Image: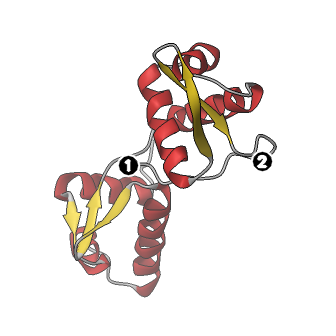
Amino acid sequence: MKKTDADIIRDILKSVGFIRRPADIFALCGVDTIRDKDSVRSNLAAFRRNGELRKEGDGYRYIGKIRPETFYIADRVWRAWRYCSVWTVAEIARIAECKMDNVQLLTCQYKKAGYVEAVGKRGNYKLYRLKDRDMRRPGVKHG
């Protein structure tokens, strides 16, 4: 199977780990034509959009390919949140069939973004609810 340009650039980024500018990759890939440089730039932009490449200081650090199941977990958790009027992290973990740590992380991220709010306690567990149960799942920065 032939490697795509994106796979080649990914391999270089894995080995280097940090780049300051696209010209660093040009030199490592051995590209010199404008068309090849545009391809590298568009791949780097796609990596930044996908979260594989993160801005860090005066350059970019390669984080790695994000596993698709991460998005599926967030979707299942969001659907469970919409289904329940109020809920605990443990309840959502059971409904969404995922780990409590994942639900707790998503709850904190969406709470920080203003989509989830704490509304009380049930025993020793905090109760949460969505502020708007009719909205679609918004994108929230992870990390």
Q: Position of residue 121 (x, y in %)?
A: 54, 23
Q: Position of residue 51 (x, y in %)?
A: 43, 55
The structure residue drawn at horizontal position 36% and vertical position 60%, both measured from the top left corner, is: 53
Q: Amino acid at mark 2?
A: Met
Tell me if residue 134 comes above or below residue 119 in the rendering.
Answer: below
Residue neighbourhood size for the residue with mark 1, other residues' Cα within 10 Å, grouped as few (<14), some (14–19), many (≥20): few
Query: Residue 112's mark?
Result: none
The structure residue drawn at horizontal position 34% and vertical position 62%, both measured from the top left corner, is: 54
The answer to whether 6 appears left or right of 128 in the picture is left
Colour setup of the view:
secondary structure
Residue 93: name its quadrant: top right
The answer to whether 83 appears left or right of 62 in the picture is right
Residue furthest to the right: 134
Element under label 2? loop
Tell me if residue 125 comes above or below residue 13 in the rendering.
Answer: above
Tell me if residue 21 comes above or below residue 88 in the rendering.
Answer: below
Residue neighbourhood size for the residue with mark 2, other residues' Cα within 10 Å, grouped as few (<14), some (14–19), many (≥20): few
Query: Residue 143's mark?
Result: 1
Q: Amino acid at mark 1?
A: Gly
Q: Position of residue 91 (x, y in %)?
A: 59, 16
Q: Disc 2 and disc 1: Cα gap in Å?
A: 23 Å
Tell me if residue 93 comes above or below residue 111 in the rendering.
Answer: above
Report the residue marked by disc 2: 135
Number of numbered callouts drawn: 2
Question: Looking at this view, is 35 or 16 the one in front?
Answer: 16
Dot in front, 2 or 1:
2
Residue 59: name its quadrant: bottom left
